[in-house]
Image (cartoon, rainbow, N blue to C red):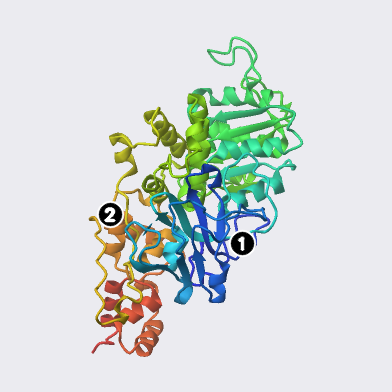
Amino acid sequence: MREALLDDVSTVSLPKRGAGERALRLVPVLTLISHPSTQRVGERLLLEELLAGKNVALSRKAPDFLRPGQTRGAPLADPCLSRKPIVFAPGEGGRVRLLVEEGGTQVVAGEPIRGGREFGTEELAAGIPLELAERVVLLLHLAEPDSGDAQDTLGMVGQSPGIRRVRRHIAQVADLKVPVLIRGETGTGKELVAQAIHQHSRRRAARFIGVNLGAIPKELAEAELFGAKKGAHSTAIKDSDGYFGAAQGGTLFLDEVGEAPPAVQVKLLRVLEKEEMFPVGSSIPIPTDVRLVAATDANLEERIREGHFKAPLMHRLAGYDIRLPPLRERREDIGLLFFHFAREEMEALGEAWRLEPEDPYAEPWLPASLAARLVRYSWPGNIRQLRNLTRQLVIASRGQPHLRVDPQLEKELGPAATPSGRPLRLGVDSDPQATPAPKAVTEPRVVLRRKPSDITEQELLAVLRAQAWDLKKAADQLGIPRPSIYDLIDKSPNIRTAGDLSPEEITRCYRECQGDLEAMVQRLEVSKRALRRRINELGLDA
């Protein structure tokens, strides 16, 4: 499977994405997304005791949160948190239970938790924001145990498994001459990765030149890249070196390489194969000494099938392939990124002091409810969108003691979605005379419409399982039209349909489950409606 979904929370093998990949052991973790002392953001607490069947108690006084690579930390220590602990306990099948004692710290996970709540493996894989006493926000999620080494950030903010994997790739390839292809959605920071490769290469003293091929008129692209002789075209009033000539000895970054015109693709392939180029209007080749780093948010394999991109060029560009995770797959980094951008903006405004209030009881500059919404948001524009939204929030709240969300941003962030699953009332019914705990009041769930291309196979599979393979309900939860979910399933090589099942497999499962359709759906993981139709066709219900 391209992205592993957890059936066992303790160990998972991540997909191979290039050289140096390894199986990663993931454990439940609490990461600080927001804290009245913003310097604490990014610290985390590993809940490894859960894997040994033990509980973890969390209060104002203990345990300590640490930064990856550090050995000394500190407890949450906010005076508004209770000394009475909340308890994280192991559940069955890798689930995690959260127990909240009456009179202790108020905990909100989309809705107030009264008594307790159990989180499934799909929720843990996505990450669950927990608001404590309307002041501290923690993300309960899965992450690698700390390896003990403080990794060079390479100018990139974050400590999620995805971004640490990207740093490892950069370290492996930076000092080599091989071309690199960086893939990732728009706004994920592809140029930042290209710059890190250049800065850690042997060419760091030479020039780094970035070019967006999507912004160059197609009729001028050839001359802009490879240079032109005087008179070669109407605007060539003198000889020009082009970007390749300007980057000699250094690194040339070609963004949106999937937009390269056919003539440019041919010449790029020659540069990569022969290390020489022909300026427009010249028949004499010029040797090139340029490290080529390309990037795209397009599906090059699909463009090849459509005849818009040359397969040999893609394979040459991808001397080493680096894939950047979208922001929604590295939610534990959102707090670090937000405060990184906020501090830059606040320093420009002369208000950075607001981020570290002297009064420990002061209202947090970033309201906990807003921090939780930032973590829940899907971020289709990724880090670029987060940076722009942070700037908008800071400027709109200029001179105010804490951030405020104006109607425009309120609309952009959308409703604060309630996490899936129902609260558990743990221990409430043990006393028959006890007064039932009041039911949590939840607002109607509003689903934002999404592009099917934004949905990963991991998310698709998680929602299908959560909705017991009811495709209509799954489509509604994902915010896509029902026909789109059929297309996504067809394109996912690791998700089967009822039509893929052999009669022998269906018959065997029918007998082992004694005809229980619900049990068969859970075991075979296919649409209930389609499976019922196959059962009828085989005459098993007769």
Q: Residue furthest right?
A: 202
* Pick the front one: 154 or 321: 154
Q: Position of residue 363 (x, y in %)?
A: 40, 42
Along the horizontal axis of the image, is 347 left or right of 475? right
Q: Secondary structure at mark 1?
A: loop
- Name the kind of residue labelled 2 in the image: Pro
Residue 528 falls in which quadrant of the image?
bottom left
How many numbered marks appear?
Answer: 2
* Pick the front one: 303 or 63: 63
Q: CA distance from mark 1 to mark 2?
A: 39 Å
Res 258 visible: no
Residue 294 falls in which quadrant of the image?
top right
Q: Nearer the viewer, mark 1 or mark 2?
A: 1
Please tell me whether residue 303 is drawn above or below residue 502 in the rendered image.
above
Residue named by callout 2: 481
Residue named by callout 1: 145
